[in-house]
Amino acid sequence: MISVSNLSKIYKSAKKSSGISSAFKSIFRPEYLNKVALNQISFELTSGEIVGLIGANGAGKTTIMKILSGIIYPTTGNVNVAGFNPTLRQKGFKFAIALVMGQRSQLNWDLSALDSFRLLAAIYDINLNTMYDRINALSTKLSVTNLIERQVRTLSLGERMKVEIIASLLHQPKIILFDEPTLGLDISSQKQIRSFIKDYARDNQATILLTSHYMDDIEQACKRVIAIKDGSIVYDGETSNLVKQTGDIRKITIAFDSIPSEKLIEKLKTEAENNSLKLLNSDVIEFDLQSTKLNNLLSLISKADEQISDLSINPESFESIAEKIITNRRN
Amino acid sequence: MDLFYQFYIQSLKSKLAFPWDTLLGALISVVAATFALSSIWSSALGDKFSTLVGLSSVEYFFLSVCCYKLTFSSFHIIDLEIYEGGLSNKLLYPHSVLSFYLFQGLADFFARLIIQLPVLAFSAFICGFSPNINIIPFFLCAILGFLIHYLSRFIVQLLSFWVEKTDYFTISMMFVVRIFSGETIPLKLLPPFVATLFSFLPFYLIASAPVQVYKSGFSELLRIFPTYLLWFAILGLLASFMIRSGLKTYTARGI
């Protein structure tokens, strides 16, 4: 359904140095920077698959989405989506895909969502009865039946995202690219959108590529995950493999009211995994810890003289786990 | 046709969401510009104005200001969409970018026309302008003028594919259209060589041609129609070439 081989994308941008003299200089002798967003990546998605795409900000996830949807041109490489070359932007291709962007709206904010749906129905040549049937089905699943006649600007972020999803799926695409659809949403909305994506793929045999910063999205919706770092694929495999490894390690960040004593730091170092303790500031430390040692940590810091202003315990990120898997395989 | 109707309804509803802004804005701009321009030229030329132009200064400027006002669409701005990445949504739709914007713009023109017609009638009453039967071919010509004005501005906005800020170009374009179209300076008052040169440019079709049609009726509209078609084809081809080239550099910033 989606096939990508040796795909590269290089963005060329003007260098903006600081200072007034360099600003004048750049008028006559502009310098350009080449940013490699994607570097020779290859992967395939089969029909009905839901694949997660993860990576830090700037890793190249959105660039992949933009190329797959035909919005931008790749620098080199071959892309095939539903039998089409996206850069040709053929009609059949546009009917086959949808791109749902968490940060961008295709709805008219001054009007109701229903008005925008009507416009989209005209754009995709969907008759009104079919449109209403689809809206009813989708809005029931997303629990927004009472919202589609409200002015879009009065909807909350979560509500707007749900009607945005309905707008993107009105023409029943077979390939859906979700670019951070749960960004900024509360836990309950995230959960609802996740389960909707899974159900939609199952019921419609749709192929879905999903990017997200939330581990739960990937873990619960995608059986397969592709991790990207600096434009290259560092992991392409089962999500469960990653989840297993995130189970043990926690990323601990402690902020102290004042600079912690050497004695306390030494004690924490002995608890931390693989010399991972590092000082982010003179009074903020970060380290990896086995989840079984969490009790030890809490008792250690409760007995210490230092006052703690903040403490966070997070699972290790997918990206870093993926990198470790790759490093271990190479060794 | 359904798409055009939906665009039209959306434009109409958006405008009706802020009716007083739309109506008052139109009233003030038409009346103020007509009075200002006709006073300047009347005081400069007196009766010579109507002898040279063939219409009274109030008649001429009321019609030319209406043309500019009606054909100027600030609603669908492609330069901002290229700059901020909003164009991406349109690239996903099964229509070409040019036809999508042109359709949307034309529907918006009709929505504006419907809403502003009572205002224009009231403005005509305030300015002391009583139209004759030629007002019908005049409005038909204004529709064609809209297409030329829209495409001219669209082409300038498409420069946003290559330059970061097109504000200077779009503001300059506004002045170019106001002067070259004859909205502020009737071409008959210019030296014959300059007037002939201006009449070969597409801007002539935005204000001067509809005013000429008001003076001469349907026969003038039929005479000038092929010129509209020719410029529409030239500007359309140029816009579509620019879109094709520009999309190769498009980075869809912000998504």
Image (cartoon, grey):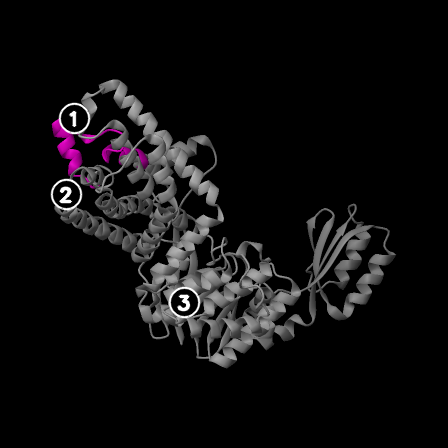
- Secondary structure under tag 3 reads helix
Residue under pointer 3: A121
Residue under pointer 2: B220
Cα separation between marks 2 and 1: 19 Å
Left or right: B199 as drawn, with respect to A103: left
Residue under pointer 1: B52
Left or right: B3 as drawn, with respect to A54: left
Q: What residue type is labelled 2?
A: Glu
Q: Name the quadrant containing residue B61.
A: top left
Magenta segment, which residues?
B174-202
The front one of A27 and A323 is A27
A178 inside magenta stretch:
no
Note whether residue A35 is visible.
no
B200 inside magenta stretch:
yes
Cα separation between marks 3 and 2: 41 Å
State whether discs 3 and 1 lie on one chain. Answer: no
Q: Mark 1 lies on which chain?
A: B
Cα separation between marks 3 and 1: 53 Å
